[in-house]
Amino acid sequence: MRKAHKIDMHVFQGYHMNRSAIPDLSSRELLAVCTIAEHGSFMAASLTLSISQPALTRTVQRVEQAIGLEVFRRTTRRLEITPAGQEFIALANRILADLRISFASMREISDEQRGQVIVAAVMSVAYTQLPRIVARYRESRTRVEIQIREGVHGTVLDDVRSGVADLGVTYVDEVPVEFSAITLATEAFHVVMPKGHPLSSKAGITLDEVSRYAMVSLPKEAQTRRFLDGLASAAGLILQHAVTVNQFATVMQCVHARVGLAIVPGGAVPSALSAGLISRPLTKPAVNRTVGVVLLRDRGLTPSARGFLGQLQDDWSLSGADKSVRRENSV
């Protein structure tokens, strides 16, 4: 074998090399050298790798030429690894191990077996539909971390716009041009109240009737509250926002405690009924809003986020709310 010029192997450790100083070696070549070292024989390595000995010899010569080092020294009795070769082989094994780990991780991410999904959602969705969908998604993807960021419509858009969230679930009747929207469903709004409330005997409740009672409401910046205030103002009414809370769950708790009424989207009806409340559709005017997913245009989704979006579209259904509405109307 041609005797290659020896150089200090410390060039492979801790030394910052520019691109021109990095040897042009393939993983197949590194594997060939490591296999020879492991078996201590060109013949055994050629059988393991299913290549001929002459081809294996040429591969080693190519590696030694690329790095400027003699890796193996063959005598009539045995194959020896040079001191520089031992250091190179250790480095090659680390590189191959890192490649195996990295490719395994990439396959897991591609197959949605590992990763992270951050979802921004308006509070009513985060409190009602989203937990069930997250549970379904994680049934087969236990190593994917899900983060839910609850907020009002504006903060959901801000989270998606800034890249903090992969996608947002909010009202999509009107969204800025930088977003694309995927419609999930149209929700009618309902008035929830404690049992025995004077309005509970009605089949439907008007905004004028709601305005006569104290209300439990979300913050002023919530799009739904601004929308309802706008409808009331157009009708010459003023809604009595007696208590303002920042969490949708607190809305239900306050209504249950008889603090006041609340107007909620149809998707929240099952939760209201399970909390022992009464729900009636809002009429005159009947209010409908479109719930959907917002994505930032021209930004791709990770495999995990794309899978979650598919689960969201497949599982989103207002059938549970519809059944609850039929049930409440019979109460």
Image: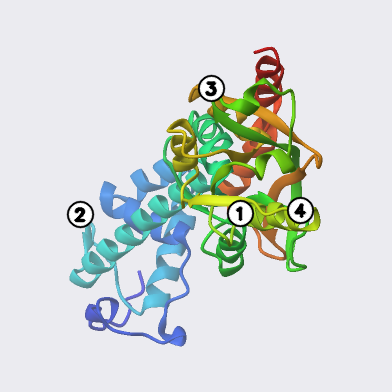
The label shown at residue 195 is: 3
In screen coordinates, is 282 left or right of 122?
Answer: right
Q: Disc 4 on helix, strand or loop?
A: helix
In screen coordinates, is 79 left or right of 322?
Answer: left
Q: CA distance from mark 3 to mark 1?
A: 38 Å
Q: Position of residue 324 (x, y in %)?
A: 65, 20
The label shown at residue 231 is: 4
In screen coordinates, is 64 left or right of 194?
Answer: left
**Observer-nearest of 60 and 286:** 286
Mark 3 or mark 2: which comes first in sequence?
2
Q: Residues within 10 Å of mark 2 (few under 14, many from 20)?
A: few
Q: Residues within 10 Å of mark 1 (few under 14, many from 20)?
A: many
Q: Would you say the residues marked 3 and 1 are in contact, meaning their CB atoms lie under 8 Å apart?
A: no
Q: Residues within 10 Å of mark 3 (few under 14, many from 20)?
A: some
Q: Residue at x 70, y 17 (%)?
A: 329
Q: CA distance from mark 4 to mark 3?
A: 27 Å
The residue indicated by pointer 1 is 167
The three-letter code of the residue at mark 4 reads Leu
Front tag of 4 and 2: 4
Q: Quadrant of residue 76?
A: bottom left
The three-letter code of the residue at mark 1 reads Leu
Front tag of 3 and 1: 3
Q: CA distance from mark 3 to mark 2?
A: 95 Å
Q: CA distance from mark 4 to mark 2?
A: 95 Å
The residue indicated by pointer 2 is 77
Front tag of 1 and 4: 4
Instruction: Name the quadrant of the C terminus.
Output: top right
Q: Would you say the residues marked 4 and 2 are in contact, meaning their CB atoms lie under 8 Å apart?
A: no
Mark 1 or mark 4: which comes first in sequence?
1
Task: Examine the rendering and report whether any part of residue 277 can be seen.
Answer: yes
The label shown at residue 31 is: none
